C-alpha cells in the first residue's frame, strides 16, 4: 500500500494520478499510539457525517460536496505527504473497530463504500481508468457495430434519467448484470440477455462493487483474526482503544433498556402519548385500532418497545391482546409469537436484536398496507399535518416541521416536534427513536420531581 | 371417515360400481392427502429437479449437493419441521408418505447438511450458511386490494385473476429478454397468487445483494398507507423495460379489460381515486363534467371507457400539453396494473417457498405449473382439487391395465407432463452440459498445470 503512494507521487510531474488507495493490504508502517486513535477519530467523523447525510436523503451531488468537505476538514494531515498514510492507517484501525459484530460491519461497509464512491467520482477520467486497471476488471468497450444495434435503447435509458447520450465518443462497457446491482436496481442501465451496458460515467458502480465485495470479505477475515489472536495479544494496549472507539461515536446501543428499567403494560398507553416519537406513536395507535400490523411495523415497534423496557412476557401479552381480536389467539400463538420471542433472542439465531435507529427507519420502504417508516418522510403532507395536530403541535410549529420535512431534514423535523411537545430544547437532535423516548422521560420525570 | 376406514376401504371403493364410489366429498384432510402422496405426487420429478444433474454418474457430479438442500414440512397440527434433508429420491418419498405434510417448503442449499447444522455450529465459525437458491418471486392478489373491487383479501375471481396473468407476462418477459434466464417455472400458489422459480445456474448462485437488485428492478410500487401517489415515474421517457411492459401488456389490459371489469370510473367514489393522481386543475374540470354527466340518462357506450377517453384527452390536449401531464396517464395505468411483488421473498436466499404440486389446505387445489406462454388460458377455478383427483382415480381404477403412472389417469396428468417437458427436461439437459463443461475446463487446467 505504502508502495502505491510513493509510486504515484514519483510520477506526478506529467500525469495526474490518484492518491485514492484501494486498501488491499495493511500499510507496513510504524504508528504512534496517539496517532492510532486520533486518525481513527478523524476518519470516524467523516463516516458519521456521511451517515447523517444519507439519512437526510441528500442527493448524489450534495453528497459528493459533503464528502469532499468532510474529508478536507478532518483528513488533511499537517504534512501533505502524510495524507496517504493517514488515510491508510485510519482505515485499517477502523476495520479492527468495526469488524466485531455484523451490525458494525454493515455500517462500516456502507459508509466506507460511500466514501470511496464519491472520492472516485471526483477523480479525473485518466485516474479513474488507472484505478480500474488496478482492480483488473476484464471489460472491453462495446464495438461500434454492437453499439449501433443497441443505440436506441441506450439513448432511451439516458433520456429516462434526464440525460443525453454523448454521440461522438460514447464508450460503453458490456458487463454481466450481476456486477452492477445498483445500476440494475435503479433502472439506470439497459440490460439485454443478462448483460448490462455501462456508460463511462457509470463505471464508478463497477469499481464500487469490487471495492465493496473486497472489503466485505476482508472484514470477516479481520473479525476472525481479532477474535482468535489480536484481542488477547493486545488486551493491555490496543484492545481498550478499539473497544472504546465504536461506542464513542456510534451512539449508545439501545437493545437493553437502561435508565428506566421497566415499563408495564398498564402504563403503556399513557407513555405512548407522552414519550413516543411520531413513528412509534403512529404504529402503536394503528395496532390498537386495527388489532394488526404487517411485518415491517411489528419489527419497528416491537424492537422499540423492547428497548423501552417491555419484558418479553409483557410484549407477548401486549401483541396477543391486540392480534387475538383480529386473527384469534390460536393463530397468534402459531404465526406471530415466534417472531416476538425471536426479537428478544429467544429463538433462531438467538441474537438480541437492536431497535432501529432513525437512519434505518428513514431508509425503510413501506409498501401497501404498511405503517412503519418515518412519518416525516413517508407521510403525505396532509397526513403529516393531521398527525401533528393530533399530537397537539401548534399550527405555527407544524409549518416549521413541514418545512423541514419538505427539505428532507426528517430528524430535524422530529426534533422540532419533540421540543414543541416538551417545552424544552433537545440539543443533541433526534438520532434514535429510543433516544427520543429516554430524553422525553428525563424531562417528564424532572418536571414531576419539581412538582412533588 | 377415520383413517383406517379409508385405508381399508380403498379397495372396496374401487370394486364398487361407479355410481356411488366415484363421489368423493369435497374437502382437505390427512386421509385424502395420504392417497395423494401415495399415488399422485411426483416425488421423483421433484427430486430430479432439486438434484440439478448431480445425481448422475458423471465424475464431476457433486454428490453432496441434494443432501444440503433444506426441505421443511408443516404437519397437520401445525407442527413445523425445518432443516430436513434427503439423500435419495426414496428417502424423500418415504418421508413425505410417512409424515404426510400439509405443506412442503423448499429452502436453500446450505454449505453443509442442514440436518447436521448443530454439529457444525460448535466449531464457532459460522460455516452453516446458504450458498445456493433459486431466484424466487411471490405475487399475491391480496396486495392488490386497493385496485380491485370484486374481491378482497384471500378471495380471487375471474375478474381479478387477470392481474396475476399480466404480472406473469411482464416478469417472465423481463427475466428472459433482459436478464437472459431460460429455466423458469411458474406455479399457481393454490389460492390467491403465483410463485416463480428461476432455476438457471447463474440465478441460483446470485448473492443477496444481486437478488435485491433484481427485485428492485421489478419494483415500482412505492405507495404506503399514508401517502397518495402509489407510483411516480421520473424522467421524460420510460426505461426500455417499463416502456415495453407498458405498450405490450399494461396499457392494452387496462383499457380493454380492467377499466370496465372493475368499473374504475363509474361512480364518484371510484373516479375520485383516479382524479387524486392528476393535477388539481384538470381534475376539477373532469369532476365538473362527470358530476353533470351522471344526470344525463342512458349512455350507449361503457361509461368507464368514455370517461377514460375524456381524461386522456383533457390531459393531453393542447393547453395542458406539458410532459408531466402525459406522464399522468402512464402513472395511472402503472398504479392499477403493474406487478406487485412480495420483495422480501426474492431478496434473501434463505426464504422458504412452497413446493409445486403441494395441495392448498384451504382450497384443496393443487399448486400446478402455469404455462407463461398460455397464461391467459389459466383458470384458477378449474385447477384440480384433491377430492376431484381422488374421484378420477377411483373411476380410472376400473380400467386396469394401463401401464402409465397413476397421475396419468387424472387431470393432474397434463400438469405433470407439462412440468417435465417444458421445464424439467430442458433444465436437466443444460445442467448436464454445465457439469460436463466445467469438468472439461478443470481437466484442461490440470493438464496445463502438469505440462508446465
Image (cartoon, rainbow, N blue to C red):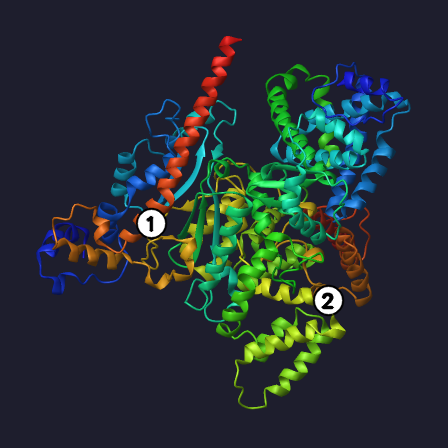
Picture coordinates of residue B282, whole percent (x, y): 71, 75
Dot 1: few (<14), some (14–19), or many (≥20) neighbours within 10 Å?
some
Give the side of residue A433 with respect to residue B187, left or right: right
Give the side of residue A332 with respect to residue B218, left or right: left
**Depth order, front residue of A134/A294:** A134
Residue at x-position 70% and y-position 47%: A438
Q: What SS does tag 1 mark? A: helix
Marker disc for residue A211: none
Name above or below for residue A89 compared with residue B203: above
Residue at x-position 56% and y-position 76%: B305
Chain ID at mark 2? A
Picture coordinates of residue A393, whole percent (x, y): 76, 64
Structural distance between the alpha carbons of marks 1 and 2: 59 Å
Dot 2: few (<14), some (14–19), or many (≥20) neighbours within 10 Å?
few
**Residue carrying label 1:** B418
Location of residue B276 by image quarter: bottom right
Name above or below for residue A248 compared with residue B315: above
Instruction: Please check whether the numbered discs 1 and 2 fall on a single chain.
Output: no
Give the side of residue B393 with respect to residue A397, left or right: left
Marker disc for residue A389: 2
Residue at x-position 41% and y-position 34%: B431
Q: What SS does tag 2 mark? A: helix
Name above or below for residue A275 compared with residue A106: below
Q: Name the front one of labels 1 and 2.
A: 1
**Depth order, front residue of A25/B417:** B417
Chain ID at mark 1? B
Picture coordinates of residue B66, whole percent (x, y): 37, 32
In this view of the protein, can residue B139 be seen by the observer? yes
Picture coordinates of residue B280, whole percent (x, y): 72, 73
Residue at x-position 75% and y-position 35%: A115
- Figure quadrant of the N terminus of chain B: bottom left
Which residue in the rendered view is the most extreme toward the front?
A: A145
Amino acid at each position: 500500500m505504502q508502495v502505491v503512494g510513493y509510486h504515484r507521487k514519483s510520477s506526478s510531474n506529467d500525469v495526474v494520478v490518484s492518491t485514492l488507495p484501494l486498501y488491499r493490504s495493511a500499510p507496513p508502517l510504524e504508528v504512534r499510539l496517539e496517532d492510532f486513535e486520533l486518525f481513527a477519530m478523524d476518519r470516524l467523523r467523516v463516516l458519521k457525517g456521511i451517515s447523517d447525510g444519507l439519512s437526510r436523503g441528500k442527493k448524489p451531488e450534495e453528497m459528493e460536496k459533503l464528502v469532499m468537505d468532510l474529508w478536507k476538514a478532518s483528513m488533511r494531515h499537517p504534512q501533505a505527504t502524510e495524507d496517504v498514510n493517514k488515510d491508510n492507517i485510519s482505515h485499517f484501525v477502523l476495520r479492527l473497530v468495526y469488524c466485531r459484530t455484523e451490525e458494525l460491519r454493515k455500517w462500516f461497509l456502507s459508509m466506507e463504500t460511500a466514501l470511496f464512491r464519491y472520492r472516485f467520482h471526483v477523480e479525473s477520467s485518466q485516474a479513474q481508468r488507472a484505478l480500474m486497471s488496478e482492480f483488473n476488471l476484464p471489460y472491453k468497450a462495446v464495438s461500434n457495430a454492437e453499439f449501433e444495434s443497441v443505440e436506441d435503447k441506450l439513448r432511451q435509458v439516458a433520456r429516462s434519467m434526464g440525460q443525453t447520450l454523448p454521440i461522438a465518443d460514447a464508450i460503453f462497457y458490456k458487463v454481466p448484470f450481476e456486477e452492477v446491482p445498483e445500476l440494475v436496481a435503479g433502472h439506470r442501465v439497459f440490460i439485454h440477455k443478462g448483460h448490462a451496458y455501462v456508460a463511462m460515467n457509470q463505471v464508478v458502480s463497477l469499481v464500487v462493487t469490487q471495492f465493496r465485495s473486497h472489503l466485505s470479505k476482508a472484514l470477516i477475515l479481520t473479525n476472525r483474526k481479532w477474535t482468535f489472536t489480536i484481542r488477547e495479544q493486545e488486551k493491555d494496549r490496543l484492545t481498550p482503544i478499539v473497544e472504546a472507539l465504536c461506542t464513542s461515536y456510534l451512539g449508545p446501543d439501545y437493545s437493553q433498556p437502561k435508565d428506566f428499567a421497566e415499563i408495564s403494560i398498564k402504563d403503556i398507553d399513557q407513555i405512548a402519548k407522552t414519550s413516543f416519537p411520531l413513528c412509534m406513536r403512529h404504529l402503536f395507535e394503528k395496532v390498537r385500532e386495527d388489532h394488526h400490523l404487517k411485518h415491517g411495523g411489528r419489527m419497528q415497534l416491537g424492537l422499540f418497545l423492547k428497548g423501552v423496557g417491555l419484558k418479553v412476557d409483557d410484549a407477548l401479552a401486549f401483541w396477543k391482546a391486540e392480534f387475538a381480536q383480529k386473527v384469534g389467539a390460536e393463530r397468534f400463538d402459531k404465526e406471530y409469537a415466534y417472531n416476538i420471542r425471536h426479537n428478544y433472542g429467544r429463538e433462531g439465531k438467538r441474537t438480541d436484536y437492536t431497535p432501529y435507529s432513525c437512519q434505518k427507519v428513514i431508509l425503510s420502504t413501506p409498501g401497501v398496507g404498511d405503517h412503519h417508516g418515518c412519518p416525516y418522510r413517508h407521510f403525505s403532507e396532509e397526513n403529516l399535518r393531521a398527525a401533528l395536530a393530533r399530537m397537539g403541535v401548534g399550527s405555527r410549529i407544524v409549518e416549521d416541521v413541514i418545512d423541514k420535512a419538505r427539505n428532507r431534514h426528517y430528524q430535524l423535523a422530529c426534533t422540532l416536534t419533540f421540543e414543541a411537545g416538551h417545552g424544552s430544547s433537545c440539543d443533541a437532535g433526534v438520532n434514535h427513536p429510543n433516544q427520543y423516548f429516554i430524553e422525553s422521560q428525563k424531562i417528564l420525570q424532572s418536571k414531576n420531581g419539581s412538582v412533588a | 371417515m377415520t383413517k383406517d376406514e379409508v385405508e381399508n376401504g380403498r379397495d372396496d371403493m374401487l370394486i364398487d360400481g361407479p355410481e356411488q364410489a366415484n363421489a368423493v366429498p369435497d374437502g382437505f384432510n390427512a386421509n385424502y392427502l395420504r392417497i395423494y402422496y401415495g399415488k399422485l405426487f411426483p416425488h421423483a420429478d421433484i427430486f430430479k429437479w432439486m438434484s440439478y444433474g448431480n445425481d448422475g454418474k458423471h465424475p464431476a457430479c457433486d454428490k453432496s449437493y441434494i443432501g444440503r438442500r433444506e426441505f421443511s414440512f408443516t404437519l397437520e397440527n401445525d407442527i413445523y419441521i425445518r432443516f430436513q434433508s434427503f439423500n435419495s429420491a426414496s428417502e424423500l418419498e418415504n418421508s413425505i408418505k410417512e409424515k404426510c405434510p400439509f405443506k412442503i417448503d423448499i429452502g436453500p442449499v446450505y454449505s453443509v447438511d442442514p440436518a447436521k447444522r448443530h454439529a457444525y455450529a460448535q466449531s464457532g465459525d459460522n460455516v452453516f450458511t446458504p450458498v445456493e437458491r433459486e431466484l424466487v418471486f411471490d405475487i399475491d392478489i391480496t396486495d392488490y386490494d386497493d385496485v380491485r373491487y370484486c374481491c378482497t383479501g384471500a378471495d380471487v375471481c375471474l375478474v381479478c385473476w387477470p392481474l396475476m396473468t399480466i404480472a406473469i407476462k411482464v416478469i417472465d418477459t423481463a427475466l428472459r429478454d433482459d436478464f437472459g434466464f431460460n429455466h423458469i417455472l411458474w406455479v399457481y400458489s393454490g389460492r390467491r397468487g403465483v410463485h416463480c422459480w428461476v432455476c438457471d445456474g447463474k440465478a441460483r448462485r446470485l448473492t443477496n445483494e444481486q437478488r435485491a437488485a433484481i427485485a428492485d428492478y421489478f419494483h415500482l410500487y412505492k405507495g404506503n398507507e399514508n401517502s397518495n401517489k402509489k407510483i411516480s415515474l421520473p424522467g421524460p421517457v420510460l426505461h426500455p423495460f417499463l416502456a415495453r411492459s407498458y405498450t405490450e401488456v399494461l396499457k392494452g389490459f387496462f383499457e380493454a379489460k380492467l377499466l370496465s371489469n372493475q368499473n374504475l370510473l363509474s361512480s364518484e367514489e371510484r373516479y375520485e381515486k383516479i382524479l387524486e393522481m392528476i393535477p388539481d386543475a384538470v381534475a376539477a374540470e373532469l369532476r365538473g363534467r362527470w358530476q353533470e354527466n351522471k344526470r344525463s340518462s342512458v349512455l350507449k357506450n361503457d361509461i368507464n371507457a368514455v370517461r377514460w377517453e375524456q381524461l386522456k384527452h383533457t390531459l393531453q390536449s393542447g393547453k395542458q400539453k406539458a410532459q408531466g401531464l402525459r406522464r399522468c396517464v402512464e402513472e395511472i395505468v402503472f398504479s392499477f396494473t403493474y406487478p406487485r411483488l412480495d420483495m422480501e421473498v426474492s431478496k434473501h436466499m434463505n426464504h422458504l417457498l412452497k413446493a409445486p404440486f403441494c395441495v392448498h389446505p384451504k382450497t384443496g387445489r393443487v399448486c400446478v405449473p402455469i404455462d407463461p406462454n398460455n397464461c391467459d388460458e389459466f383458470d384458477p377455478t378449474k385447477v384440480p382439487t384433491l377430492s376431484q383427483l381422488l374421484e378420477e382415480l377411483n373411476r380410472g381404477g376400473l380400467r386396469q391395465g394401463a401401464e402409465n403412472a397413476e397421475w396419468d389417469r387424472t387431470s393432474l396428468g397434463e400438469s405433470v407432463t407439462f412440468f417435465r417437458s417444458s421445464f424439467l427436461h430442458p433444465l436437466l439437459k443444460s445442467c448436464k452440459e454445465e457439469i460436463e463443461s466445467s469438468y472439461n475446463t478443470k481437466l484442461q487446467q490440470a493438464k496445463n498445470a502438469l505440462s508446465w
